[in-house]
Amino acid sequence: MAENSFTKLSLAGQVGVSLQLAALICGGFYYFWYSDALEQANNKRAHLDQLRRYILALEVTATKVREFQRELQLLEAKLKTLKRILPPERETPARRGGRPHANLPEREPMLPAPGDPGVGVKADRVMLGRLFT
């Protein structure tokens, strides 16, 4: 065997130096390679979880779109039925007789309510007279 400083150490010294060298190699491995790989794996897992949530949201949206399409078809069928029943144009009062509410009499201006200041018995008699005429 060759004579060097390592072989001159006792067995416990050789084991200690070997353990220190192994710890240095493991620490270098962890620091330079494994920590970066672990961080990348965690980032990829987080991205995968985010994509899964996004896909789930899209599936829910797709389900709702199908439901809305079914509802739209039902409403379109109902609209088609109502179009057959209803007239093609809206009937407005202007088209019936020239003025709105053609069948209703002209409305008189309202009188102040009884009990208001300045309104006496005369206003009450006027209102009663209009009710019974």
Image (spheres, rainbow, N blue to C red):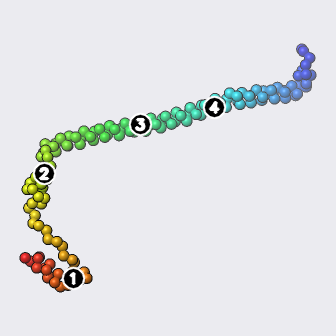
CA neighbours of label 4 inside 10 A, class few (<14), some (14 to 19), many (20+): few
Q: Earlier in the sequence, mark 4 or mark 1?
A: 4
Tag 4–tag 3 contact (CB < 8 Å): no
The quarter in which the C terminus is drawn is: bottom left
Residue 18 located left or right of residue 56 = right
Q: Nearer the viewer, residue 12 or 70?
A: 70
Could you give the CA–CA distance between mark 4 and mark 1, rounded to whole angstroms? Answer: 91 Å
Q: Which residue is mark 1?
A: 119
Please provide percent x and percent y for residue 88.
13, 44
Amino acid carrying mark 2 in the image: Glu
Q: Nearer the viewer, mark 4 or mark 1?
A: 1
Please provide percent x and percent y for residue 24.
78, 28
Q: Which residue is mark 2?
A: 91
Instruction: Identify which residue is drawn at 13% across, 68% down.
Output: 107
- Identify the secondary structure beneath mark 3: helix
Which mark is on residue 38? 4
Q: Which residue is mark 3?
A: 58
